[in-house]
Image (cartoon, helix red, strand yellow):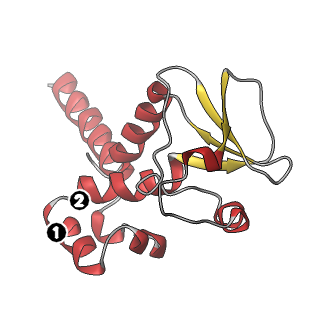
Amino acid sequence: MKKTVLTMVMMGAMLISFAQQHIPMSEYYVTPQLSEELTAAKVEDLRANNPAELVRVNYTMFNYATVISKLWDGNFQQMGTLEQYLPKGMTYLEEDIIQKGYVNPYKWNLPQDDYRYNLFKLRRSGYYVVVLPKVTWEERLNAHLHQYGF
């Protein structure tokens, strides 16, 4: 009897701990920059009908291709300059990209390697855009989705 009660208490504590790790969607903050990609109506539709997709799109927007100013020891693949991947008919200001700290992956088609970081050089000295390897990206995205119970 003592063992059963103790087991139930331990399982209850584990469930409480697990429940506290998830952030409810009602508290999920959608960044204003997401309006570059989605309308307010589409955001609310996703929040109600496909919240996992909303979290994925929002996370991808800011984390798929980020601006860095310092390289670390890593397996980088030099991809040339960012402007080589500029979509046809699109213009951009490098200062805007540096200030934002990311490149919108839904507008730019920046390739992703399975195991190496793809590095795109900006004209302004010392700045790069880096795209995480697919394996690392999927781990981080899944960990982020898990925070919201997906």
Q: Residues within 10 Å of mark 2 (few under 14, many from 20)?
A: some
Residue drawn where x is 56% and y is 55% of the image? 103
- Look at 25% across and 41% down and name the residue there: 12
Nearer to the camera, 33 or 122: 122
Residue drawn at the location 20% of the way across and 26% of the way down: 2
Q: Secondary structure at mark 2?
A: helix
Q: Which residue is mark 1?
A: 48
- Figure label count: 2
Mark 1: amino acid: Ala
The answer to which of 114 and 140 lies nearer the viewer is: 114
Q: Is residue 120 left or right of residue 72?
A: left
Quarter of the rendering occupied by the C terminus: top left
User: In terms of secondary structure, where does tag 1 sit?
Assistant: helix
Left or right: residue 52 compared with residue 63: left
User: Which label was assigned to residue 51?
Assistant: 2
Residue 38: percent from left, percent from top: 32, 70
